Amino acid sequence: MNALADSLKRQIATTGPLSLAEYMTACLLHPEHGYYTTRDPLGAKGDFTTAPEISQMFGELLGLCLAQSWLDHGAPERFVLAELGPGRGTLMADALRATRAVPGFHAAAELYLVEASPSLRVLQAERLAEHAPAWCGSVDDLPDGPLFLIANEFFDALPIRQFSREGTGWRECVVGLSGGKLARGLTDAVPQDGLEHRLEDTADGDVIETCAPAQRVAESVGARIAAQGGTALLIDYGDWRSRGDTFQALENHAPSDPFANPGQADLTAHVDFEAIAKAAAPASHSAMTHQGVFLERLGITPRAQALAQKLEGDALQSHIAAHRRLTHPSEMGSLFKVLALYPQGAAPPPGLDP
Ligand code: SAH
């Protein structure tokens, strides 16, 4: 019994196939049956884990990077410290602990969390109680002021559309019904506004993905940073230009069929960093950099060595494994990328090149 599957099937039978974006939105954020709305998906007992849940070093280094950027921008005496999709609040808690020693940073920060899930908001409220966060449903609701923002594995959760090239047109991947089950289908080929540039680097049958909500978020963050100052650190898995079918479902840390159990699996797609960088103009963007390289430049190895001094046995082994997992190219080190947004004429934050 899957109430969301039944309701989506009824909807498709009545009004026709759904775009992948509509399907993803329902699966992730349906008010009663959505994946994020109904649970805490993170950690060993959940379906997936993320860098801040793997090691405290991740949030510490990102926090210090953002604080240094705040200093480099003249230490504005009031600023908006924001996180998009904060999960359990672990990253922000680690970032705020590490930045206690930065004079004036906490006093100047007003903490805002952009979170869609009511159940995760509860966890964030517990974790970050001493910092009195406020919540927003969207970046558009953030108050004015210099904006220093972090987003880790936020953009990959936003709904994508997927297209397969045919001639100069594109067949869109849709979700319909086959033998009473939810199944992937393709529309006829039609030209798509905004995909003209992808005719240059694709051939018949090639699959690409677009994420309009990610572009809207990047546009809003970029415009604020260009006009009011600040820095955004965006970390996610993906690449400079989307290519291929990256739509995937994860359940209990293992890949699953994204159409088998709507609302019960995490659905993600790789992030197209080029599309984000373009949408964020007039803010400047850094070079897209591998997470492993970025963390090494920020000093993860000396930090790992310092923490290792106080550990032994299993705790030491899992700490060493966590360091490797975050940075090694065969683990998260090169799959995950970092992109920073900052005002034109300013320097990129530490660890990133212009
Ligand atoms: N950044 C955290 C969690 C990543 S999971 C970490 O690294 O551990 C994705 C997060 O984005 C969750 O908190 C989820 O509820 C949130 N989210 C997903 N779609 C969203 C949307 N459209 N608006 C706001 N938050 C969203």
Image (tube, grey):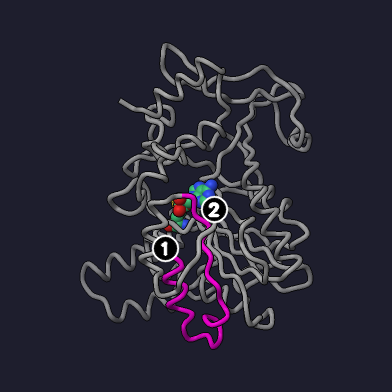
The secondary structure type at the circle numbered 2 is loop
| Region in magenta | 89-116
Residue 296 position (above or below residue 260): below
Position in image of residue 178 (x %, y %): 46, 14
Crowding at label 1, few (<14), some or many (≥20) Cα neighbours within 10 Å? many
Image side of residue 30 versus residue 186, left or right: left
> Residue 124: horizontal and vertical position, in percent?
40, 62
Local crowd size for mark 2, using a 10 Å CA cut-off: few (<14), some (14–19), many (≥20): some
Amino acid at dot 1: Gly
User: Can you tell me whether the CB of the residue at mark 2 lies under 8 Å from the nearest atom of ligand 1?
Assistant: yes
Q: Position of residue 308 (x, y in %)?
A: 32, 77
Q: What amino acid is labelled 2 in the image?
A: Gly
- The residue positioned 67% from the left and 17% from the top of the image is 188
Q: Tell me if 177 is positioned left or right of 76 in this view.
A: left
- The image quarter in which residue 74 lies: bottom right
Asked if residue 110 is positioned above or below residue 45 in the image, the reply reads: below
Q: Please give the label number shown on residue 89.
A: 1
Instruction: Farthest residue to the left: give it.
Output: 313
Q: Which residue appears at 57% of the width and 73% of the height?
A: 66
Q: Quadrant of residue 70?
A: bottom right
* Residue 114: in magenta span: yes
Near-viewer residue (132 or 314): 132
Pick the residue in front: 280 or 291: 280
- Examine the rendering and report whether any part of residue 335 can be seen: no
Local secondary structure at mark 1: loop
Q: Which residue is mark 2?
A: 137
